[in-house]
Image: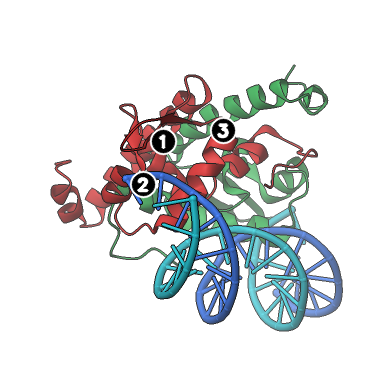
Chain colours: A green, B red, C blue, D cyan
Amino acid sequence: MKIRKDYTCPLEIVHDLTKGKWKPIIMFQLRYGEVSLADLERNIQGISQKMLIEQLNELVLYGIVNKEKYEGYPLRVEYSLTQDRGHKMLGAVLIMQDIGIDYMKDNGMEDVLKDKGII
Amino acid sequence: MKIRKDYTCPLEIVHDLTKGKWKPIIMFQLRYGEVSLADLERNIQGISQKMLIEQLNELVLYGIVNKEKYEGYPLRVEYSLTQDRGHKMLGAVLIMQDIGIDYMKDNGMEDVLKDKGII
DNA sequence: CCGTATCCGATCCGATACTG
DNA sequence: CAGTATCGGATCGGATACGG
């Protein structure tokens, strides 16, 4: 899609692998294991199906997310983090989640955190 | 600039705080302490002065980077990570740096790493 | 050395409609 | 349930020129 061959530093690549409004949230949703597309769509407020699939596909392409198809009826597809790169990135995402929680507490947005049962 | 009041989850905010091609690289460059604008410009390959200052300003605005002016001649300005949010974000950036290094090793880009003395 | 201003193409992402 | 296709406004980021 857009991974070049002429990067000048490691962080420049990782930015291309993970950029996009929804990618960190998607990775976070996959923290406990396999999740279906429908569940992701349900659990991520405000995302459109188009954006979800688009960013999910990029994450798959970049070795961060695994896509597993289970044949049969109904057709089932499950997404999960890859063992190495996916879980490593999750480490970074969890730190960011923590920063976001602190930021919300510092800026009077506790209501959002309560809605989600975080506090 | 663009921090709203209606976020629906912590990661959405953090994305707004840290998005932009150069922000992770800037934070990485500040990992050891104060750095001047000129040094940042020198050490970050391919960045323009405009982008550097723009993204630096956002990081300052969001409490991730500190800007210290030292009066006198020559006028000196030094940037550094803030004690709390800045260093916390650095934790995430360091993980990403690591992932980028692995990615480059896996994809035949060792030359970049050698240039930088990483391997 | 430190910063500001403008112009402009590339891309991101939301809305919407349609398929197996 | 799991996807694909298209269109258009908003934003991003590179180039360039100028000012403290």
Instruction: Give the vertical position of A44 relative to B85 (above or below).
Output: below
Which residue, given by chain and number where applicable, does mark 1 sit on? Answer: B93
* Disc 1 and disc 2 in contact, CB within 8 angstroms: yes
Name the element at disc 3. loop
The residue located at (64%, 41%) in the rendering is A35
Residue A11 badge: 2
Chain at tag 2: A
Within 10 Å of disc 1 (Cα), the crowding (few <14, some 14-19, many 20+) is: many
Amino acid type, callout 3: Arg
Name the element at disc 2. helix
Within 10 Å of disc 3 (Cα), the crowding (few <14, some 14-19, many 20+) is: some
Amino acid type, callout 1: Val
The residue located at (30%, 59%) in the rendering is A7
Q: Is residue A66 visible?
A: no
Look at discs 2 and 3 and give the one toward the viewer.
Answer: 2
**Residue nearest the viewer, comparing D9 with B102:** D9
Residue A31 badge: 3
Name the element at disc 1. helix
Q: CA distance from mark 1 to mark 3?
A: 19 Å
Please state, as top left, top right, bottom left or bottom right, where the C terminus of chain A lies in the image.
top right
Amino acid type, callout 2: Leu
* Disc 2 and disc 3 in contact, CB within 8 angstroms: no
